[in-house]
């Protein structure tokens, strides 16, 4: 037996007990006549003591030669610690060592295994197995385990059945590029890794498994934006014989359960907002509602003067920054430069100070009088002491720009508090979106999303106006889940494929198996998938998902630890009937 106890469980009640511990050397302190060693495992740290009055000379010499991260086993007696450490659970005791065994020596790590390490992210990713020994990463992975256990417990109690679906499937157009896997046994043919188990969970509904879930890996070969991974995990759920309200209630219940059990927080309100209103009021479809700063559209009160920047714009829109009138001119100039960054793309920013005495001072005083600026304040909800920030331009672009500014200001003002949780349903997304490159409509979610009841005929006359029976669950400005009521009959699904530009032959080749299944009595069904990585990070008070993934990839989709992806040799290529045609 390598250990009788772990390094986090011994207390004063264990004094005088003989114990065996094993772990890694965190650090040591050598006073010559006495050596202290901190021994660490995933449960905590226990101090070891080697004392020349009670320890042999050979044993002290052994202890003096221990290096950081050596793997050791010790036997000894639990004694009261002379200088107690209230900062760790084992701080009242230490182990008087009688026997020391070095299980494995270690090179000096490339960074310190401490909570606040001296290792940069790239270095820590290369040596991720060392990074996992650090408390922040270790605790994040344990936290993820706790969340997934609570998910399984809750859904199982609600009658959901966990069912695995295949990883080697057929390539189907679902938005992003597929990762493909060549088949050696079927020359010239390829599997794809699933972007989601979408069609399989629908087939499970046809099969009568009316409450399904799966914690499942998904894969998308897309250009990575910040904090995205090419492989990610979903809590994938589907239900049959339901309407939209049933699904919203079911997964509000799961979210409440997680917030209560994991964070100790009761959340009762799950407000709902239409997609169109979310875009109008917040400029994006996943608004953070922990704070205000709703958009005020200013066209009617700003486009009647000789200021051509506003007059020529599709949309003039502003927000009121609480307490922003305290900003100096230099600070406002920095904000203007911030929105002009390529990542945001605004050409500039107009502002108006709301003075405590009810007057206004604007960067465009030449064109707008006090009455005009008072109307700006009324539309944006600005109060004395606030600052009104105004952008203008193309509707979609300017909303995105002001949304970015709103989030940046909230961050600077400390309004995005990680221990506050504000869930929100965003409803009634567009069913289709127009793609300028291909000059055709694409499904905003996926081709199996049902239109809102009564809107099917609108597909023939105004496809862009059709709303989807779709919904996203947003938490603290992040989409944590999304889903829809699905199409469950062959005729409607065929019509949808027509509007998406599929020929009957293409639809048959890609999705014939699903269309065939619909002919055998498909029930009404729908579902929702949570992004587990993002959900866990937010519940853990973070917005970066990497520390909650054991072995993440970098922004280029590479695993720098194992150096993947990597070339394969000619023999493997030949066996798979592949030939490389690399661009120079």
Image: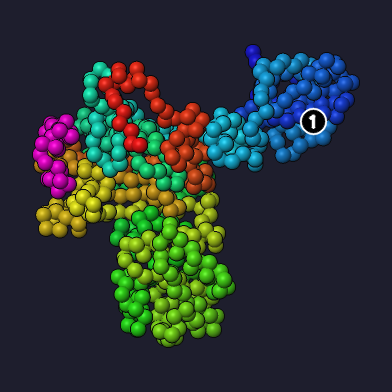
Q: In the rendering, at what x and y percent does residue 139 appear?
A: 57, 36
**Which residue is rendered at x = 72% and y = 18% of the image?**
74
Q: Is residue 172 left or right of residue 492?
A: right
Query: Percent from the top left, x then y, of residue 484?
Result: 27, 45
Residue 197 point in image, percent of width and height: 29, 34
User: How many numbered circles does the render carry?
Assistant: 1
Give the color scheme: rainbow, by chain, secondary structure or one colour: rainbow
The residue lying at 34 percent from left, 62 percent from top is: 397
Q: Main secondary structure of the magenta part?
A: helix
Queried whether the magenta region covers residue 112, the answer comes back as no
At a point 44% along the width and 30% down the height, the residue shown is 564
Horizontal arrangement in the rendering, residue 566 relative to residue 168 (left or right): right
Spot the residue most to the front: 584
Q: In terms of image quadrants, where is residue 23?
A: top right
Q: In which quarter of the image is residue 299?
A: bottom left
Look at the numbered disc 1 and give the secondary structure of its residue.
strand
x, y (%) of residue 568? 38, 23
Residue bearing the label numbered 1:
29
Towards the viewer: 426 or 107: 107
Q: Measuring 39% from the left and 49% from the top, which residue is drawn there? A: 479
In the image, which residues are magenta? 495-520
Quadrant where the C terminus is found in the figure: top left
Q: Answer whether residue 522 is visible to the viewer in this image.
A: yes
- State which quadrant residue 521 falls in: top left
């Amino acid at each position: 037996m390598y250990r009788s106890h772990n390094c986090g469980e011994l207390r004063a009640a264990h004094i005088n007990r003989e114990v065996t511990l094993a772990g890694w050397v965190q650090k040591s302190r050598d006073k010559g006549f006495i050596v202290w060693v901190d021994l660490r495992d995933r449960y905590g740290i226990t101090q070891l003591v080697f004392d020349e009055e009670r320890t042999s000379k050979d044993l002290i010499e052994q202890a003096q030669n221990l290096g950081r991260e050596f793997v050791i086993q010790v036997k000894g007696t639990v004694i009261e610690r002379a200088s107690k450490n209230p900062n760790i659970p084992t701080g009242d005791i230490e182990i008087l060592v009688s026997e020391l065994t070095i299980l494995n020596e270690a090179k000096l790590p490339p960074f310190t295994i401490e909570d606040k390490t001296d290792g940069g992210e790239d270095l820590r990713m290369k040596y991720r197995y060392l990074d996992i020994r650090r408390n922040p990463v270790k605790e994040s992975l344990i936290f993820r385990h706790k969340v997934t256990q609570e998910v399984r417990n809750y859904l199982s109690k609600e009658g959901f059945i966990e069912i695995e679906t295949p990883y080697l499937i057929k390539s189907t157009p679902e938005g992003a590029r597929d990762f493909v896997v060549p088949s050696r046994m079927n020359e010239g043919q390829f599997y794809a890794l699933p972007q989601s188990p979408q069609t399989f969970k629908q087939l499970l509904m046809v099969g009568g498994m009316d409450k399904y879930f799966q914690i499942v890996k998904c894969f998308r070969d897309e250009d990575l934006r910040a904090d995205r991974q090419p492989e990610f995990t979903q809590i994938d759920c589907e239900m049959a014989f339901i309407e939209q309200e049933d699904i919203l209630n079911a997964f509000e219940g799961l979210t409440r359960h997680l917030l209560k059990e994991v964070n100790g927080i009761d959340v009762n309100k799950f407000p709902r907002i239409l997609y169109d209103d979310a875009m109008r009021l917040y400029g994006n479809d996943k608004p953070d509602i922990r704070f205000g700063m709703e958009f005020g559209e200013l066209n009617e009160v700003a486009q009647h003067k000789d200021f051509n920047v506003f007059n020529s714009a599709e949309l003039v829109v502003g927000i009121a920054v609480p307490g922003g009138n305290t900003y100096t001119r230099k600070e406002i100039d920095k904000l203007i430069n911030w929105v002009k960054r390529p990542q945001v793309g605004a050409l500039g920013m107009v502002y108006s100070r709301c003075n405590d005495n009810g007057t206004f001072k604007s960067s465009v005083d030449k064109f707008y009088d006090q009455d005009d600026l008072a109307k700006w304040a009324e539309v944006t909800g600005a109060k004395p002491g606030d600052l009104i920030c105004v952008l203008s331009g193309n509707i979609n672009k300017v909303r995105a720009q002001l949304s970015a500014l709103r989030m940046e200001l909230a961050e600077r003002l400390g309004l995005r508090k990680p221990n506050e949780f504000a869930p929100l349903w965003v409803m009634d997304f567009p069913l289709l979106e127009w793609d300028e490159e291909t000059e055709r409509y694409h499904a905003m979610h996926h081709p199996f999303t049902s239109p809102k009841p009564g809107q099917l005929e609108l597909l023939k006359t105004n496809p862009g106006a059709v709303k989807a029976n779709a919904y996203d669950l947003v938490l603290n400005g992040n989409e944590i889940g999304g889903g829809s009521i699905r199409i469950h009959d062959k005729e409607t699904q065929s019509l949808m494929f027509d509007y998406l530009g599929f020929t009957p032959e293409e639809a048959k080749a890609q999705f014939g198996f699903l269309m065939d299944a619909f002919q055998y009595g498909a029930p009404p069904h729908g579902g929702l998938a949570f992004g587990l990585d993002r959900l866990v990070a937010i519940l853990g008070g973070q917005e970066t998902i990497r520390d909650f993934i054991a072995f993440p990839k970098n922004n280029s989709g590479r695993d720098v630890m194992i150096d993947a992806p990597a070339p394969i040799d000619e023999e493997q290529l030949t066996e798979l009937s592949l030939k490389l045609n690399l661009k120079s």
